[in-house]
């Protein structure tokens, strides 16, 4: 390919006469702005975490009650044993 320059235009840019090759490239990017499915999954996960926390709290309170009940049963058994003797 040969290109020849022939002077300048009124603004001072070079004028090109002859064969020219043109190249172009493109790039496209995309990003989801809002994903309803992901939003719903997050909401469900939050509710499951709250439910698990409530179940844990209930199990903890149940353990405290069972330990206290067992302790008082032992005290009662000791008291009954001392009374019988």
Image (spheres, grey):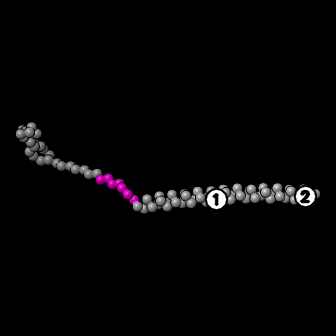
Residue 31 image point, x, y percent: 35, 54
Prevailing secondary structure of the magenta residues: loop
Q: Going from the N terminus, do you reach mark 1 or mark 2 first?
A: 1
Rate crowding at label 1 as few (under 14), some (14 to 19) or many (20 or more) other CA atoms within 10 Å.
few
The residues colored magenta run 28-35
Residue at image mark 1: 58
Q: Is residue 64 left or right of residue 26?
A: right
The quadrant of the image that shows the C terminus is: bottom right
| Inter-mark Cα distance, 1 to 2 | 37 Å
Residue 63 image point, x, y percent: 70, 57
Residue 84 image point, x, y percent: 92, 59
For the residues carrying marks 1 and 2, which lies nearer the camera in this image?
A: 2
Q: Is residue 60 left or right of residue 6?
A: right
Residue at image mark 2: 83
Camera-side residue of 16 and 45: 45
Rate crowding at label 2 as few (under 14), some (14 to 19) or many (20 or more) other CA atoms within 10 Å.
few
Q: Secondary structure at mark 1?
A: helix
């Amino acid at each position: 390919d040969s290109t020849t320059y022939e002077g300048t235009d009124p603004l001072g840019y070079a004028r090109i006469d002859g064969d020219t090759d043109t190249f172009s490239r493109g790039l496209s990017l995309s990003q989801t702005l809002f994903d309803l499915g992901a939003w719903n999954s997050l909401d469900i996960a939050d509710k499951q975490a709250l439910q698990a926390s409530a179940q844990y709290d209930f199990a903890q309170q149940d353990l405290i009650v069972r330990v206290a009940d067992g302790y008082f049963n032992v005290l009662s058994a000791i008291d009954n044993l001392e009374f019988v003797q």
